[in-house]
Image: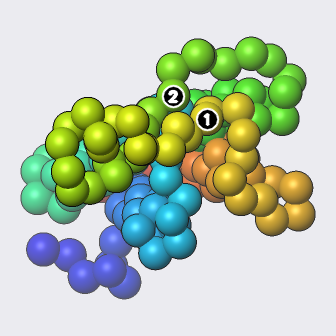
Amino acid sequence: MQTLRSMPLAQRLALGVPLLLLGGAYLSEYGFGLFPCEMCWWQRYPHFAALAFALVSLFVAPKRMWVALAGIAILVSGAIGGYHAGVEYGWWEGVTACTTVDAGGGSALDAIMNAPLIRCDQAPWTLAGISLAGFNFLISTAAGLVVLLRLKDVK
């Protein structure tokens, strides 16, 4: 297996960006109580795929193909994040589905009735006016483009 220093930038980004963004998502969820809405989950799925593709690129040839698939998956998550941010900012209407959080303990009916609704059109947290979905859009789009542009370095 390669060491981190010997990996091309594209491969390091394809591995690191989804790992860091998923880690941040789970930290915000379990550490700070910012539970994900339905569209937040949609943004995570491509990052899981990108992480899997990047890990496969460490062991299976052709590395370039796996890194390219990871870069595309990162871009897909960024596109979903951009759509979600637009919904949060009121630029367009989003999906009507919301998700609930397990209230824990008791019967299933009690858990459903007491679980908070997580709305897709309200940002639970912002920094300088940018929501988590907006940050995912910015980071994932930039990283995905860099991964794809740097593929020439992957052998």
Q: Quadrant of the N terminus?
A: bottom left
The correct choice, above or below, for 62 with respect to 14 in the image is above
**Mark 2 element type:** loop
What is the three-letter code of the residue carrying label 1? Arg
Identify the image's colour scheme: rainbow, by chain, secondary structure or one colour. Answer: rainbow
Marks 2 & 1, CB-CB < 8 Å contact: yes
For residue 67, say whether it is visible.
no
Closest to the observer: 140 or 6?
Answer: 140
43 versus 10 height, above or below = above
How far across and down, in percent of the image, does residue 9 sit?
47, 66
- Residue 102 x %, y %: 32, 48
- Given the image, on which type of amino acid does mark 2 rest? Cys
Q: Residues within 10 Å of mark 1 (few under 14, many from 20)?
A: many
Give the total number of marks visible in the rendering: 2
Q: Residue at x 58, y 16 (%)?
A: 96
- Using the image, determine if residue 29 lies above or below residue 87: below
Q: Residue at x 42, y 44 (%)?
A: 115
- 4 relative to 146, above or below: below
Task: Identify the residue position indicated by label 2 in the image.
Answer: 98
Tell me the number on the disc at residue 79.
none
Horizontal and vertical percent position of residue 117: 52, 38
Residue under pointer 1: 119
Is residue 125 visible in this depiction of the protein? yes
